[in-house]
Image: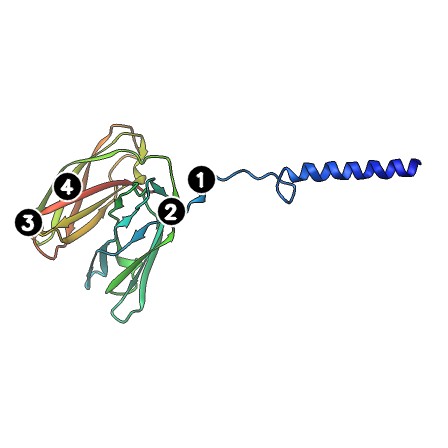
Amino acid sequence: MKSRQLFAAVLIAAALFTVSCGSGSSDGVTKAESSPLDVVKPSSSVEVAWFWSDDESTLMRFVAPITNPGDKPIEGLETEWIAYDAEDSIVGSFEAERATIPAGGTLPYVGGAGGAILSGVPAKVEVRITDPGRYSSNAAPALAVTDIEFKKEEYSSDYTVTARGTTDVELTSDELAAYVILRSAAGEIVGADFWMPYNLPSTLPAGSKFTIEAALIPVSEKPDSAEVTLVVEP
């Protein structure tokens, strides 16, 4: 009789243990539910819209807009560019996380390299998305750009673009970058460069104003307008 009672008690204990394990995951560990923003993989695209290289200085610049058709910003997106020479040999590459891509908008990514980063003269560049990132509910900091001006250099055919930047939040200066694009009267890209804040203090308080200047930009024809996009890069 006692052995039957003991056997019944063992069965009840086993049943209770099974029920308690069933309330979590299959391995007995309760897993946190994923956020809807994490579950949906962002859809974006990148395409090289303009490319320029200099044979003498092994310098190149390109414009590769990244488009986000979604209704939420994308953060954490990573791109890689690969440069090839005229013989289709790889002469350089670079991978990095990009700034936040606005919802339903485009990030006018301007990239490039020169000097020791390139082992030869680039003839073309490919840009691809290596990590689609994630949708975010966080809006990018408001960075204003005003007073955009451009002028031809006095002793060359290159151009200089200047503008005034303002940030509404505190930032470290090494987070800032600016994409500069020169266009013809027909709207075609004729020159581009990127600006890095080498001469700014390490921390910029909210409301800081500063000068953006991209000098000695080669152009394929006389520009009619200039665009400057200020971004926060990870």
x and y percent of residue 90 in the render?
32, 65
Residue at 15% of width from left, 53% of height from top? 189
How far apart are labels 4 and 1 at the CA level? 42 Å
Residue at 41% of width from left, 47% of height from top? 41
Residue hosting label 1: 36
Three-letter code, disc 3: Glu
Among numbered discs 4 and 1, the one appearing first in the sequence: 1
Residue 122 appears in the rendering: no
Residue 17 is drawn in which quadrant?
top right
Foreground tag (4 vs 2): 2
Residue hosting label 4: 162
Three-letter code, disc 2: Pro
Residue 164 appears in the rendering: yes
Residue hosting label 3: 154
Mark 2 crowd level (few <14, some 14–19, many ≥20, 10 Å Cα): many
Among numbered discs 4 and 3, the one appearing first in the sequence: 3
The residue tagged with tag 1: helix, strand or loop? helix
Among numbered discs 3 and 2, the one appearing first in the sequence: 2
Three-letter code, disc 1: Pro
How far apart are labels 2 and 1 at the CA level? 12 Å
